[in-house]
């Protein structure tokens, strides 16, 4: 049974930093992509940052470029999201996701191509 377990959310002031982690288990074969999505109240889920697990190629949404960094530790089946320069508009529930579909290689920030999801971790940024 596939499990994605997130940790590291919390509350910070604008300009602060948080580091999210996701531990993956139960996969039969490696996923093609893993990443982070977020959903704020009343808004659709949106891609934040993803990477291709084989090459480690990252993809970032425009609002987080230059502030967030996604990385993976294959040996530990762990993916992290380092978030610096946080803004109030980054406030949302953050979800770890994984995809075994090749579609994620061409649509890396689109939620529908990701078939596995964690429970989410809340990030709140105050002004």
Image (spheres, grey):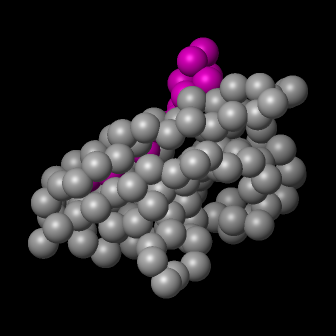
Kindly tell me whether residue 82 is visible in this rendering.
no
Residue 76 shown in magenta:
yes
Which of these two is toward me, 34 or 11? 11
Q: Position of residue 93 (x, y in %)?
A: 45, 61
User: As drawn, is 44 to the left or to the right of 93?
Assistant: right
Location of the C terminus by quadrant is bottom left
The boundaries of the magenta stretch are 71-84
Q: Position of residue 42 (x, y in %)?
A: 49, 84
7 shown above or below 121: above
Q: How many marks?
A: 0
Residue located 79% across and 61% down the image: 113
Which of these two is toward me, 6 or 50? 6
Q: Position of residue 80 (x, y in %)?
A: 46, 38
72 shown above or below 52: above
Q: Quadrant of residue 34?
A: top right
Which of these two is toward me, 123 or 105? 123
User: As drawn, is 38 to the left or to the right of 29?
Assistant: left
Kindly tell me whether residue 84 is visible in this rendering.
yes
Q: Position of residue 57 (x, y in %)?
A: 61, 45
55 shown above or below 84: above
User: As drawn, is 18 to the left or to the right of 22?
Assistant: left
């Amino acid at each position: 049974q596939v499990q994605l377990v997130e940790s590291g959310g919390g509350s910070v002031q604008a300009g602060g930093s948080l580091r999210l982690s996701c531990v993956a288990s139960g996969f039969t074969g490696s996923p093609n992509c893993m990443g982070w999505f977020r959903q704020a109240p009343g808004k659709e889920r949106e891609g934040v940052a993803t990477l291709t697990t084989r090459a480690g190629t990252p993809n970032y949404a425009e609002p987080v470029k230059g502030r967030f960094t996604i990385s993976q530790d294959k040996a530990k089946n762990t993916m992290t999201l380092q978030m610096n320069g946080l803004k109030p508009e980054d406030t949302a529930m953050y979800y770890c996701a994984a995809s075994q579909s090749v579609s994620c290689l061409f649509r890396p920030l689109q939620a529908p191509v990701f078939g596995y999801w964690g429970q989410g971790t809340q990030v709140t940024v105050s002004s």
